[in-house]
Image (cartoon, grey):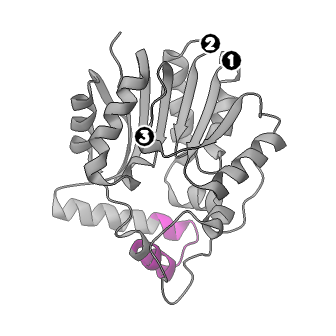
Amino acid sequence: MVDSPKDTLFNVDYVPEDFVFNERVVEVFDDMLDRSIPFYREVITASAQILDSFLSPGDKVYDLGCATGASLLLFCRLLDHKTLHFIGLDNSGPMLDKARLKAELYGKQKSISFTFEDITTFDHPGAGGVILHYTLQFIRPLQRQDFLNRIYDSLRPGGVLLISEKVISHDPRLNREYIAIYHQFKKSRGYSELEIAKKREALENVLIPFSVDENKAMLIKAGFTSVETYFRWFNFASFVAVKPV
C-alpha cells in the first residue's frame, strides 16, 4: 500500500467541530486506521477467511462506509481466487475520489467499483456478503435496527454480514479499564495525550458504541439465526451474522 500522510489532525489546542469525514480526514485516513484500530489487518484477514467460506464465485460483496477503499483492496487481494465483485458505498465524495484513484493505481478497477450512496437506505437484493467494519457506530442509534433489517433483506439466503465495532461494557470499572488500555495502545502508536483527548472530544457526539450483547440482539431481531463474535480485543469486537438458507 502507498503510505498515507501522518495523522496529526488533533495535535491542536482546541477542536473546532465534531468529527466529519472531510478532505482533511481523507488525506490522513489510512494512517488513522492503522494507528487507531487494534489488529486492523488481522481483522481484515480473518474476515476474508469467513467470506471465502460462505461466498460463491460471482457473488457481489458490498463494503458499506468503504472510505478510501483500503480494506476493499486487501479483500480483493486475499480473495482474488474467488472471482467476486466488490462494491464500495460511501456518502463522502472525497473518500470515494481517493478510493477510485487507489483502485486504478493497483489495477483493480475491474474488480472493485465505488458508488456515492447513503448507506442507511441500502437496497441491493441478491448480495452475497456485506462488510460493515467500524461504520455502524456512526449511524444514529434509532436508525440502526432498520438499517440492519435492510441489509438482512438484501442478502441472498446463506449470505453473510460482517461487522466490526468499538463496543462498551456495562460494567463501569471494566469500561474504564478498557478505555485506559485502548489509550495506552494509541500512545504506543505515536499519538500524544493531547491528540487522544481531542479526538475523543470530537467523536463524543458522533461515535456512539453499543455493547456486544446489544449488537447481537439487533442482528437476531433482524432475522439472522447464526450470530457469533469472531474477534475481541477489550473495547473492540467483530461479529459474523449468517442469513438462513
Which-is-in-front pick, marks 3 and 2?
3
In the orientation shown, which residue stands out farthest toward the top? 245
Residue at the limit of the structure toward the bottom, as seen here: 13
The kind of residue tagged 1 is: Thr
Tell me if 152 is positioned left or right of 97 in this view.
left
Q: Within 10 angstroms of label 3, few (less than 14), some, or many (20 or more) residues?
A: few
| Most common SS among magenta residues | helix
Residue 83 showing in the rendered view: yes
Label 1 vs 3, first from the N-terminus: 1
For marks 2 and 1, give the CA distance. 5 Å
CA distance separating discs 1 and 3? 27 Å
Residue ID for mark 2: 57
Q: Are marks 1 and 3 in contact (CB under 8 Å)?
A: no
Q: Quadrant of residue 244?
A: top left
Q: Amino acid under label 2?
A: Pro
Are circles 2 and 1 on residues that touch, CB within 8 Å?
Answer: yes
Residue 83, label in figure? 1
Coordinates of residue 147 in the picture (x, y in percent): 35, 39
Q: Residue at x 46, y 40 (%)?
A: 132
Which residue is at 49% across, 46% downward?
118
Left of 37 or right of it: where is 232?
Answer: left
Please name the residue shown 54% across and 47% down the image.
Answer: 40
Judge the density around disc 2: few (<14), some (14-19), many (≥20) Cα neighbours within 10 Å. few
- The residue identified by callout 3 is 121
Q: Bounds of the magenta span? A: 185-200
Mark 2: secondary structure: loop
Element type where label 3 sits in the image: helix
- Image coordinates of residue 91 in percent, x first then y, are 55, 51
- Select label 1 or label 3 by which is in front: 3
Observer-nearest of 9 and 35: 9
Residue 62, image x, y percentages? 54, 32
The amino acid pointed to by label 3 is Thr
